Amino acid sequence: MDELLRLDGNAAAGVLGEVFSFEATTAEYACGGCGRAGTLGGAVVYEVREMGVIVRCPGCDNALIRLAHNRNRHVVDLRGTTSFTTG
């Protein structure tokens, strides 16, 4: 499926920068699936062209962040994290 691209977590810096006022790739998360902690830059990103990104835990593949583009707005879902802390 060439519309789905697996990328390093740092690849989401641009789109996350449109939503958050801090450098999101240095933000720390705790995964709601396996409890793993890390920075978003070390997570796995799946980019669906023209739709948004999914940031996944590299330990269990749980969706940490879902970010969609909808009519010139961003919709952010952080339910996959138990905590999200700025760096």
Image: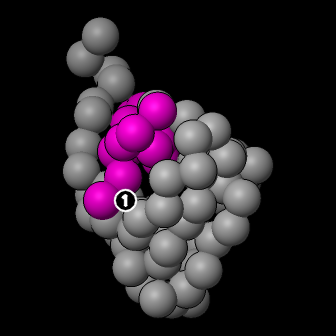
| Percent of width and height locating residue 16 | 49, 68
| Percent of width and height locating residue 80 | 67, 46
Which quadrant would residue 1 be assigned to in this image? top left
The residue at the point 55 percent across, 35 percent down is: 62
Q: Secondary structure at mark 1?
A: helix
Q: How many marks?
A: 1
Residue type indicated by callout 1: Ala
Q: Indicate how the structure is coloured in the image.
A: one colour
Question: Does residue 43 appear to the left or right of 86 in the view shown?
Answer: left
**What is the residue that sits farthest to the front in this orientation?**
35
Q: Is residue 23 magenta?
A: no
- Asked whether the viewer can see residue 72, the reply is no
Which quadrant would residue 74 be assigned to in this image? bottom right
Whether 78 is drawn above or below 22: the answer is above
| Percent of width and height locating residue 29 | 55, 65
The residue at the point 28 percent across, 31 percent down is: 5
Q: Residues within 10 Å of mark 1 (few under 14, many from 20)?
A: many
The residue at the point 48 percent across, 77 percent down is: 27
Q: Front-most of 67 and 33? A: 33
Whether 6 is drawn above or below 26: the answer is above
Q: Front-most of 80 and 11? A: 80
Whether 5 is drawn above or below 53: the answer is above
Q: Is residue 44 magenta?
A: yes
The residue at the point 39 percent across, 79 percent down is: 26
Q: Front-most of 70 and 23? A: 23
- Asked whether the viewer can see residue 83, the reply is yes
The residue at which mark 1 appears reads as 12
- The magenta stretch spans which residues? 42-60
